[in-house]
Image (spheres, helix red, strand yellow):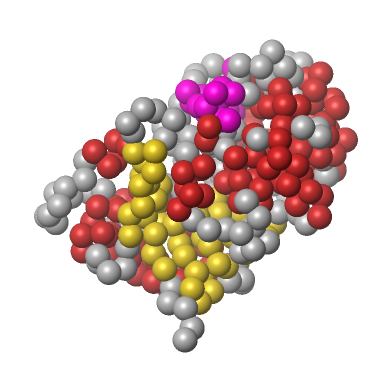
Amino acid sequence: MLDYFKDEKTDTFRQLNKLLKSKSIASDFAPFSSYSPVYIETNECQRGVLSKLDVAGKDVLCVTSSADFAFNALASGARKVTTFDKNKFAKYVLALKIATIKTYYSASGYSRFWLKDSPDYLSKRLFNDIKNHLSPRDYEFWTYVFQDNFNLRESNFIRKTMYGTYNMQNKYNIYYNNYYYLLLRQALLKEPIITYDLDITDIFNIKESFDVIYLSNILQYYKEIELLKDADTVHKFLNNLKRLMVKPGGVVSVNYCYWANLLEFCDFLDTTLEDLVNILTLKYPSEYDLQTFSTVFDDTLEGICLTRKRALK
């Protein structure tokens, strides 16, 4: 069918067709797998994250997901961004978003295609303008997805969240501001984002070191990750991550904490406690730091848990 998918054609297109043809709704909480519904917008307040995490002039590794953290980091002056994701479809979302940015010279042009409250949201008309900025592999993938016999916007391919409006994304992302959008566009034209199809426990296969590693909230699900069965194992994993992949003085954002997680925090450690950040900050208080910030919702705090590698003396 598509020449660029001969090696992965069976799995990739069987799973893709399953999602595109499904009439069920993939919510924000749909299971995560190698071929699962994709995020096309962030559900994290990344303005808040970047108020606590300095990426300017830094080499950054982050989860691919909706591509928004990678874009916000570049717009904030990151030197280089590398991404990884267990979901093999995430790299195609990243590619289409980059192609959109290369097509449009303003944030308003970009948002017309990607935001749910736009009449041109994921429209085939705009896709026909964008597609010529895709690589041959990504071009073939997305021209297949945008066939008339699929309803992409209503399909199970896309996770349905409440965050996909202009009001939310403009408040969550700095690159929706045209000044930062143009900085991002310049950065993407200068150097590509390298991305890997890797689960979090496989990222040691990336043979580089970074100043900043952003893990989103993957580790909140540590009990569902085969090699990370308990918080102590996660702690050991993070120490190995710092030792092998973080530059001296660098930082790992261990977990994004939503307001609901923070509400459940307690100040004593017991055997029933399950929230990862709560356990780590109580059990290893000198190694983990919870930084909170305001979100778009009034009187609501969210946060990130950080762990740092000592700088060289």
Can residue 163 be found in the magenta stretch?
yes
Name the foreground residue: 40 vs 223: 40
On screen, residue 122 versus residue 168, left or right, reads: right
For the N terminus, the quadrant is top right
Q: Is the magenta stretch mostly helix, strand or loop?
A: loop
On screen, residue 106 versus residue 221, left or right, reads: right
Query: Residue 175 occupies which quadrant of the picture?
Result: top right
Query: Residue 151 occupies which quadrant of the picture?
Result: top right
- Where's residue 146, x and y in %? 75, 24
- Where's residue 107, x and y in %? 72, 32
Asked if residue 191 is positioned above or below residue 145 in the image, the reply reads: below
Residue under the image location 15 percent in, 52 percent down: 267
Magenta part of the chain: 154-170
Asked if residue 266 is positioned above or below residue 242 in the image, the reply reads: above
- Where's residue 282, x and y in %? 20, 60
Residue under the image location 47 percent in, 65 percent down: 251
Query: Residue 254 occupies which quadrant of the picture?
Result: bottom left
Q: List the single residue furthest toward the right.
A: 132
Residue under the image location 83 percent in, 44 percent down: 135
Q: List the single residue furthest toward the front.
A: 179
Asked if residue 26 is positioned above or below residue 57 in the image, the reply reads: above
Asked if residue 132 is positioned above or below residue 194 in the image, the reply reads: above
Residue under the image location 47 percent in, 39 percent down: 44
Residue 139 is at least partly visible in this image: no
Residue 281 is at least partly visible in this image: yes
